[in-house]
Amino acid sequence: MKSFRKYISEISGLRFIYENLELNSSAGRKRLLNCQLLTKEFELKVNIQSLSETYEFVKTKKNKEFVSNICRTLSQINDISASISNIQFNRVSDDIELFEIKKFCINSQRVLDLIKKSGFSLILLHDLSEVIEILDPQNTKIPAFYIYSDYSPELSDLRKQKDNAKTVEQAEELRLKCLEIEDKIRKELSKKIAKYVNKLEYNLNRLADFDILIAKAKIALKLSLTEPKFTQEITFYHGLFNPQIKSILENQNKVFQAIDIEIPTFPTLITGANMSGKSVLLKTVALSQFMFQFGFFVPAQKAEILPVEEILLSIGDNQDELNGLSSFAVEILNINKIISKAKSSTKILALIDEPARTTNPDEGKAIANAIVEILSKLEVSSLICTHYSGINARKKLRVKGLQNISENENINIENINDFMDYSLVSVEDEKAPAEAIRIAEILGADKELIEKARKKINKI
Amino acid sequence: MPFLKEILKYKSLAIIGTEKNTGKTECLNHIIQALKHSNKTIAITSIGLDGESLDQVTETPKPEIEIYQNTIFLSSEKHFSQKQITAEILNVSEKQTALGRLVTARAIDTGKLIFSGPPDTKWLKEEIQNSQKYGVDLFLVDGALSRKSTASPSVTESMILTTGAALSANIPNLVKKTKLLTELIKLPIFESNLIDELLQIENGVWAIDSENIIHNLEIQSSLLLNKTKDKLYSKGNIIFASGIITDNILDFMRIQKNIKETVLIVKDFTKIFVSQESYKSFVKAGGKIFVLLKPKLISICVNPLSPNGFVLDSKKLREELYKAVKLPVYDIKALD
């Protein structure tokens, strides 16, 4: 199974989400990067429920100070899993590791105190004050550590002698004696702490989870994400948007047109002119499904989502060409994966952009038709964009495309988006929109090219 | 110690050697010892080449620095674990240096240490700021004038330069070289609200246009000017070199028509590796060099002994140097 880390570089838009996450601790960052897609409904429900509670908590004004205190303390939580596992395997910890454990426990206690005061009951932590006692013989509660003289009267005595040593040789001899005792103490301390290994590990994971939850809640507020509902039937989005593109457009004082769409458990065919946002739509649906199954809120005004076991894409922007495969080969491999998964009864969401577009149109259309037929038979939740006419599908949608253009409107590459209506309408007819030449003209293609193309299409 | 009072006016001090074996470590040890009985808390770290337990040039063991109880020190995990003193750990960084994480510790007893500190300027600056929370009065940086070091000691408020027979075995030549360095140290600060932004830039040659906007000139380094000369002035006459500069950029700029309007900015004097001839001609032709960081140069310490055993006349050396640079000059060994 792939981890979140892997998907960041594969799924368009997920890096944007990751980069906007305000994680405070290295422990939280590591845990998020290593987490895997949640596929069981139970896990997902617990996760979304926790996020929902955290979201409400973070949103409430009176908790603002608590949240910033928690975040400050969480930023002190380092990933001490290496130090913990050392103790687990009965190795003797060095001073740096003992320091890390002590600092961790002190901060864990601080979070525990903060949680108690705030009445936030979602995160349960073990009390680690006993570990602090072991590592803090002077009872200072300050995150600092060395083998204190308080641990052993003998050590204390030897250290005093060493400080007052008359000769260098004498001092060196005493120093070595001190080292011996220090090592003994380290061994004892490690043994004592070993009893708390499970609690340490548990708290480390809970604190990392807490950090992730707060970061997810904050990004939900920042990007206006919404809590998704579960469904066992038709996935439904009202006002679905792409957070990254929306943010880019907002910086240019433009508005992202949110989309409403339903994804039933059989293929939906989507047609539309070039530049009408079909690819963006597929990528956004993919992003949203991934966010949902990694326990995030989703980029929509309202969402009901069917959880799946795998989200499979054939969107044609991967770099496999570099591995010596043609774009057609890459596509067929991706499609094949989708079909074989579907045939093995894996519950999948398949998102396919213009299947078989890079081969001759007759065969291409035949292949596309075959794909839709198989996915229909296997009842695969899927969206398939195409420019081909005459594909048989139970459900067909068309992007409205260029709208409300008066005669002398000057449309060009700069303003074309202002005239594009990205919303989807249900259609019955089998003809895909033929606007390629017009769009090419708007994009400023060579005049001769446009004229010639027009003449040729009229002949047909 | 004569310059102790001056040193304590500042929160941080870098000791920088003009060359290996110019007595930098003696100077550091001397300062630490002089402060031993004051009630000042000292912190110390090094920005020499990482892992320099052997002197890179002479392969002699790198001198250890003696520190006293309550001194804070910053060292990488590798050198921390080799320490022979008892020390209380106060912090362990999350970031890694080439030699492990950076450990901040307080000495519990007295002893000698080798240490290696933050590998870059930004990190060093952060550590100097962080040390405030341990009540540090003076942060000492064992600095290096090295093309290889990416950390600049100039983030400190003040500086002592060590020079000596290791730089040149001939007094007039030694004075000349040291004088050039002190002149570079005194280069004026480029007064601008862009300083922090410019300090962040790690690579290439940049320009600042008349509207105070920074442009990447797509010139990888001032050392690779030959192939990209036409780009240099494409955004105006204010040029920022993020890395080191050598004679070639000064010589190139000097013969251009716009030399009188030319402003060359570097991060600090440690990035300037130029000959006296090129520098003088550049300035004479009307070119100006500015820096982003400028510590106050407190004094110069000399070591009349060269590593191959040659000895200069300490008194004469100090006198000649003083005449040339008009700054207090000390020979640490001759102080006692």
Image (cartoon, coloured by chain):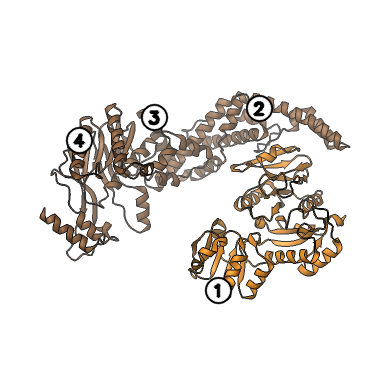
Query: Where is mark 4, residue-wise?
Result: A370
Residue sitting nearer the eye, B224 or B265: B224
Instruction: Tell me the subunit letter for badge 2.
Output: A
Chain for numbered disc 1: B
Residue B215 as seen in the image, left or right of residue A397: right
Mark 3 lies on residue:
A43
Indicate which disc, 3 or 2, sits on the residue closer to the N terminus: 3
Disc 1 residue type?
Gln
- Residue B42 x %, y %: 73, 49
Percent position of residue A183, x then y: 72, 28
Same-subunit check for callouts 4 and 1:
no
Query: In front here: B262 or A361?
Result: A361
Give the label, 4 or 1, closer to the camera.
1
Q: Quadrant of the C terminus of chain B?
A: bottom right
**Secondary structure of residue under mark 3:** helix
Chain with colour orange in the figure: B
| Count of residue discs | 4
Q: In front here: A267 or B178?
A: B178
Neighbor class of circle 2 (other Cα within 10 Å; few <14, some 14-19, many 20+) is many
Which residue is under mark 1?
A: B256
Q: Which residue is mark 2?
A: A92
Q: Going from the N terminus, do you reach mark 4 or mark 3 first?
A: 3
Residue B334 found in image quarter: bottom right
User: Which chain does the brown colour mark?
Assistant: A
Residue type at tag 3:
Glu
Give the Cα distance between marks 4 and 3: 36 Å
Question: Regarding mark 4 in the picture, which secondary structure is present there?
Answer: helix
Looking at the rendered structure, whether the residues under marks 3 and 2 are on a common chain is answered as: yes
